[in-house]
Image (spheres, rainbow, N blue to C red):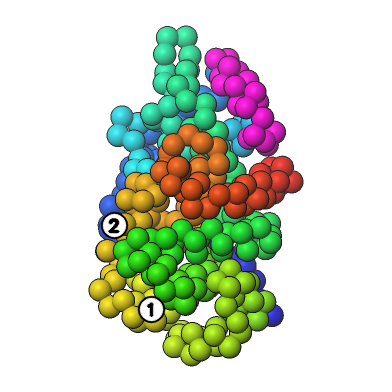
Amino acid sequence: MEQKSVSKNYSSTYLYNKSNQYEKNIFDFVMHGEEINKQDPTFEDIRYDIKKRQISNSLVKVLDSKNVILLSRSMPMPRAFKVFCCKDPKMNDGKYKVFIDVSDIIKKVEGGYRCNSIDILIAYLVDAMNTMIYYMDPKRLIMRNEIINEGAYCFATLFTHVIDYLYKISTTPAVRAKCLYLSSMYYMVNILKKEPTDSIKTSCRNIAGIQPREADVIDLKLDKTSFVNIKYFIETLSDSLRIGKLTIDTFLEKWLYLFGTGTQFALEMYPSFSAMITNAYVGCYLNNQKTIEKILGRHIIPFTLCILKVGQESV
């Protein structure tokens, strides 16, 4: 029986803990950022433009939610944290809020506010909606077939593309299949926090195109630390694929080069990974969407449409 799905915090990831600046940046931004007044009459133009794009009727509800705070500051947040969830240190209610950094896209002008990129704001709102649901009721998302299977396919295919870029493993189909199997399993176990049940293993085998016996041989080399974090997984993969020069730093450098600055937490966090996919779907060039689209093709669509559907049902 699968374990109960629960949300995952940045503080539990390897990459977040590599730097002591992330938490300080978040705290300073929330404490000192200027909150955008969503009740200002000029905001109606922004609401109208969001409705006109017709991506989802729920996005205006997300925009207007008291749990979603738009902040602007002269020193914007890094790309990885344009949308994030945390307790508001200025309040004593202990409630989590979703904060959106709109420093670069919403400007205070004479007479009100102006948004210079509705597409980017829409991408942020999709991310905010997804993040809000993930932390309030994660089962609504991560028990969905599209998030499980399409998500695993997308993650494993992107991950394997980086390994292939570094080591040309596609010249050896069995090695590429092994990489697909292990990376899809990593997505299931680490990012979605699922137990590696028979059904999960079947999904991973289908993505990799391997037989149960082949998967059993791969599984024999795994241990309880293999999927704990991205560093341990890279070490596991290096040993399993026999590419000894592979390190987390080498891999991360190429991941960021291929898919864009700020996508590093997609390797350990569901909200960050899903934002990487939905940003490409919206089409506002917040990441290297052309590369992502070329690699994933139509698989971007059912994954994103599932998130939008859950948003329609939840918000």
Give amino acid for label 1: Leu
Residue bounds of the magenta highlight: 41-59
Give amino acid for label 2: Glu
Q: Which mark is residue 241?
A: 1
Q: Is residue 178 left or right of 130 when viewed as pictured? A: left
Q: Which mark is residue 253?
A: 2
Residue found 62% across the figure and 63% down from its top? 148
Residue found 36% across the figure and 56% down from its top? 255
Provide residue 39's location: percent of width, then percent of height: 58, 22
* Residues under numbered marks 2 and 1 in contact, where contact means CB atoms less than 8 Å apart: no
Quadrant containing the C terminus is top right
Circle nearer the N terminus (2, 1): 1
Task: Determine the residue located farthest toward the top in the rendered image.
Answer: 111
The magenta stretch spans residue 58? yes
Separation of residues labelled 2 and 1 (CA atoms): 19 Å
Answer yes or no: is residue 55 visible.
yes
Provide residue 35's location: percent of width, then percent of height: 45, 30
Q: Nearer the viewer, residue 9 or 154?
A: 154
The magenta stretch spans residue 212? no
How many other residues sit within 10 Å of disc 2, few (<14), some (14-19) or many (≥20)? few
| Front label number (2 vs 1) | 1
Residue found 47% across the figure and 9% down from its top? 111
Provide residue 177's location: percent of width, then percent of height: 49, 73
Quadrant containing the N terminus is bottom right
How many other residues sit within 10 Å of disc 1, few (<14), some (14-19) or many (≥20)? some
Is 290 drawn above or below residue 196 in the view shown? above
Q: Secondary structure at mark 1?
A: helix
Which quadrant of the view contains residue 145?
Answer: bottom right
Residue found 67% across the figure and 36% down from its top? 56
Report the predominant secondary structure element of the magenta stretch. Answer: helix
Provide residue 33's location: percent of width, then percent of height: 38, 34
Q: Nearer the viewer, residue 296 or 65?
A: 296
